Image: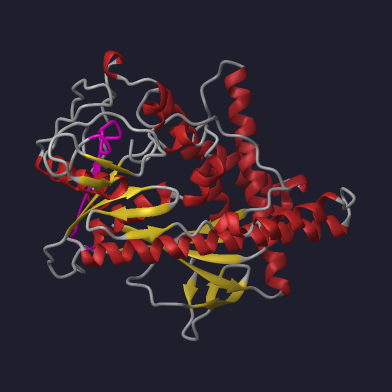
Amino acid sequence: MQLRYAFRIEPGPAQRIALSRAFGCARVVYNDALRAREGARRDGLPFPKLGDLSKQLITAAKQTPERAWLGEVSAVVLQQSLRDLDTAYTNFFDGLKGKRPRMGAPRFKSKRDRRQAVRFTANARWSITPGGKLRLPKIGDVKVNWSRSLPSTPSTVTVVKDAAGRYFASFVVETDTSKVLPQTTGEVGIDLGLTHFAVLSDGRKITAPKLLRRAEKKLRKAQQNLSRKTKGSANRKKAVVKVARAHARVADARRDFHHKLSTTLIRESQAVHVEDLSVKGLARTRLAKSVHDAGWSAFVGMLEYKAARYGRTFTRVDRFFPSSQLCSACGVKDGPKPLAVREWTCTGCGTVHDRDVNAARNIRTEGLKVAAGQAETVNARGAQVRPAFVPAQRATRTPVRKKQEPTRSCQPTGWAQTGIPGL
């Protein structure tokens, strides 16, 4: 399994200039390569290969007065920029073929983009000094704020400058699955929501922090201050950074909350079962800001890779599974309920249910069936839905089979298509 570790770095004034030069050179090579490929497409010619682009746009370009300054940065940075473009084209064409979700064609990079990044591989001969500094070619020894030790020798390092003006060193390391947590007997189903971020099948409710909502006052003030600045002025650039820092604080706090909660659940439970929500669908509703503030996709992704790393079981329950319509005690389907109904009584056995806790218990039960390959769920209209393929764990590093979509006759209508939690 490959993991990424990011650490804050503190380059000096001269090193910041050198990094800015590396960002700019990588961006120019990327744009030149994109322009060459788009020109070949427009003329009906085959795409130039990566090796030909490297010879033309890097090796030969350094000999010309217009691109002589490309020699001031490491050649590995420029080569990796070409590889990034090649990967972008591969992902674009795979999306057209249905091998992965669709994405747009590669676009030109702008020097006004607030986020910049360059990557150094082993060929660049970067290293970590005995004093704990990061030695980068043609940049120097950069101070790193180590918060923990790396589990193995990293293969690459990516230097990132984010929109808030902070610098990070991101290392990719290979880890094995030998670090398995002790076996436990607990299994938990998780119902994600907005008022309560997560409701567990054992009755626990995790209150949603709503970090973006809490920071809206400061964000609004920073945005208003930015709108009053003259475009192109130095004060406007400072105001842009202040807005970016305000958003970065919210994102960092949300990521910290996700990491702590996901780690706790993985340590306590041998198996974790989560409903596969349609976040894209919910992001097109009036709940969009709250949905993005919750960050369900990032949280579920953390649960998935941590379960694979520590030897736990992770399953996704189909989004059309009617978790809020079934009685977790007797299994009777009691029909759809408005979101305002938070408690209901089963017409079959008379059990009084908390809507979210009951949904979490049903997700746990269905997750056990999915893990055993016995799931055959019904959608909100009672039609049978074939069980979806379970995604492979990240540790296997094998292609993931595309999940089967329900037939047109089985698709629900109205609110059932949005994947609202608990429906």
Q: Residue at x 58, y 29 (%)?
A: 37
Q: Residue at x 28, y 31 (%)?
A: 320
Where does the N terminus fall, quadrant-wise?
bottom left
Give the overall secondary structure of the magenta segment: loop
Q: Which residue occupies the extreme top position in the image?
A: 409
Q: Which residues are magenta?
A: 310-325
Asked whether residue 106 is in view, the answer is yes
Q: Residue at x 56, y 38 (%)?
A: 53
Where does the C terminus fall, quadrant-wise?
top left
- Is 420 positioned to the left or the right of 359 in the image? right
The x and y percentages for residue 72 are 68, 60
Q: Is residue 309 magenta?
A: no
Depth check, front residue: 398 or 306:
306
Depth check, front residue: 190 or 147:
190
The x and y percentages for residue 107 are 61, 34
The x and y percentages for residue 20 are 69, 60
